[in-house]
Amino acid sequence: MTAIFDGMAGALADVFGAPVLYTPKTGEPQTVQATLRLEPTEVQMGDGHTQLISAPTLRVPRTTLPGIARGDRISLVSEPAAEYLVVNRIPSGSPAVDADILCELEPVIASGGV
């Protein structure tokens, strides 16, 4: 029954997303198409209720980054100086094979010297 929804997350990422650089804790960085939101967003949780997330978020199809995890880093390809750390992976209520993964992010503060 989920087959009618398969492919939707990837199509939405292609339309509304942008290239982001994904750097896992271990492994090589890769550029993927995803949606990075810096403003608060309301999301539907796995149990059906909605929740307001005020932190930056990343939305990416499950098939694109199935192993994304806490501690991985994200930056926009167009703005590599703005880097974010994955702090939480929010479960999706969608049964689709390529359902979006939603990750809560926090900005990485660069430590600079004088």
Image: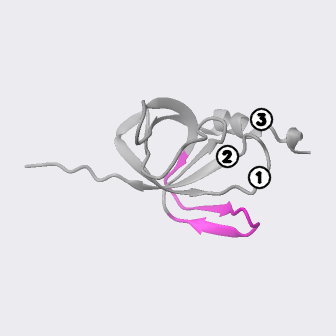
Q: Is residue 1 left or right of residue 109?
A: right
Residue at image x 44%, y 40%? 24
Magenta residues (range): 36-54
Residue at image x 56%, y 42%? 67
| Picture coordinates of residue 46, whole percent (x, y) | 72, 62
Q: Earlier in the sequence, mark 3 or mark 1?
A: 3
Instruction: Work out how far the residue at label 1 is from the one at label 2, CA to CA, in angstroms.
Output: 8 Å
| Above or below, 100 relative to 43 | above
Q: Which residue is mark 3?
A: 7
Instruction: Work out how far the residue at label 2 is from the one at label 3, CA to CA, in angstroms.
Output: 10 Å
Name the one closer to the observer, 44 or 26: 26
Task: Label 2, secondary structure: give it.
Answer: strand
**Cβ–Cβ below 8 Å for labels 2 and 3?**
no
Q: Which residue is mark 2?
A: 100
Q: Residue furthest left?
A: 114
Q: Earlier in the sequence, mark 2 or mark 3?
A: 3
| Picture coordinates of residue 31, whole percent (x, y) | 49, 29
Residue at image x 69%, y 63%? 45
The amino acid at mark 3 is Gly
Name the one closer to the observer, 20 or 97: 97
Q: Residues within 10 Å of mark 3 (few under 14, many from 20)?
A: some
- Quadrant of the drawing holding the N terminus: top right
Labelled disc at residue 107: none
Q: Earlier in the sequence, mark 1 or mark 2?
A: 1
Q: Which residue is mark 1?
A: 94
Task: Label 3, secondary structure: give it.
Answer: loop
**Cβ–Cβ below 8 Å for labels 3 and 1?**
no
Instruction: Tell whether position 57 is magenta.
Output: no
